[in-house]
Image: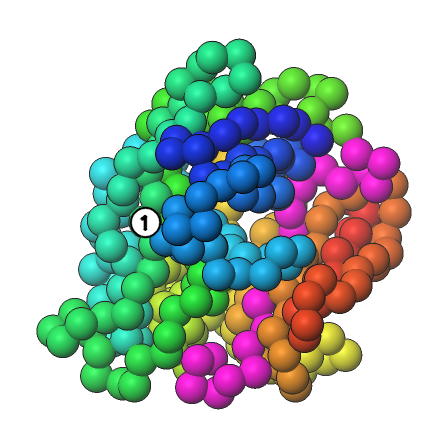
């Protein structure tokens, strides 16, 4: 686990679990003694502790071509759009300044692609975007061997599955994901994990041979479930449990 630091504004701090493919799991918390008003104004301020609150996408560069993604999603008329990237940053414990920009999903307004009933966008229901504006390896030091060694043998992400029980939300998010990836998702059949849905192939920051990676949206029988599969050098298997309320998380290990 890599200690990161306190974000600009002082409301939150984080640690990273880094993987060899350049992806990371972020453990984030509000700083001790944070002003309750300041916390309430934060996008995650009302969320309970101990659960998955969000997930993010990126692509190479500083985000200058993000407008193409925005246009694709708007054209899908899903009732969800992305605002322009907003600059952010923090200072590392060693004093290095890190800069990035974040774009969050929000409800579409009239004229922005809202010809179907919109679904309230709670953080985590659709991914946000994060674009590095300083060297990514300064923020995500996956090139340090000690940072990417894990007892499970995990070396990267094979796939992320987001299960959605609400039918209207499922249809809206399917349009959003089609817009994000620029293509129609491939149909996925029902199995022991959940209902049918769609899958999209994705890339990772650090090339890892011929391994495949995907993001899937599937219908759920109940609740909201996030499933993460990791490539591992050691074994196949599954671990998981309940995070909060009806939220569960399962980690599949795929020997590679």
Please, is residue 120 above or below residue 154 in the view?
below
- Classify residue 177 by image quadrant: bottom left
- Residues packed near mark 1 inside 10 Å, few (<14), some (14 to 19) or many (20 plus): many
* Residue at image location 49% in from the left, 26% down from the top: 139
Frontmost residue, 49 versus 227 = 49
| Region of the chain picked out in magenta, as a range | 150-170
Q: Is residue 4 left or right of residue 158?
A: left
Please, is residue 187 above or below residue 235 in the view?
below
Horizontal and vertical percent for residue 226? 63, 64
Frontmost residue, 35 versus 109 = 35
Please, is residue 208 above or below residue 129 in the view?
above
Viewer can see residue 57: no
Say whether residue 189 is magenta: no
Viewer can see residue 238: yes
Horizontal and vertical percent for residue 248? 71, 67
* Residue at image location 54% in from the left, 27% down from the top: 5
Q: How is the image coloured?
A: rainbow
Where disc 1 sits, the SS reads strand
Q: Is residue 81 left or right of residue 166?
A: left
* Residue at image location 79% in from the left, 52% down from the top: 253
* Residue that badge 1 annotates: 103
């Amino acid at each position: 686990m890599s200690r990161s630091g306190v974000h600009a504004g002082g409301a939150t701090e984080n640690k990273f679990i880094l993987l060899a493919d350049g992806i990371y799991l972020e453990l984030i918390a509000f700083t001790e003694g944070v002003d309750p008003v300041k916390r309430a104004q934060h996008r995650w301020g009302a969320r309970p502790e101990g659960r998955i609150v969000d997930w993010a996408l990126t692509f190479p560069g500083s985000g200058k071509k993000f407008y193409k993604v925005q246009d694709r999603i708007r054209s899908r008329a899903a009732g969800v759009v992305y605002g322009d990237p907003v600059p952010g940053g923090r200072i590392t414990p060693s004093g290095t300044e890190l800069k990035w920009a974040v774009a969050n999903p929000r409800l579409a307004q009239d004229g922005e692609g809202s010809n179907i009933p919109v679904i309230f966008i709670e953080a985590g229901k659709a991914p946000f975007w994060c674009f590095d504006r300083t060297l990514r390896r300064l923020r995500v030091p996956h090139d340090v061997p000690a940072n990417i060694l894990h007892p499970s043998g995990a070396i990267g992400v094979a796939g992320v599955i987001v299960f959605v029980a609400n039918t209207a939300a499922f249809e809206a998010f399917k349009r959003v994901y089609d817009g994000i990836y620029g293509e129609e998702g491939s149909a996925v059949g029902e199995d022991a994990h959940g209902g049918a849905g769609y899958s999209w192939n994705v890339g990772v920051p650090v090339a890892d041979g011929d391994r495949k990676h995907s993001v899937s949206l599937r219908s759920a029988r109940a609740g909201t479930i996030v499933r993460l599969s990791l490539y591992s050098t050691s074994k196949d298997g599954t671990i998981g449990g309940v995070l909060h309320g009806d939220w569960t998380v399962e980690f599949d290990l795929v020997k590679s």
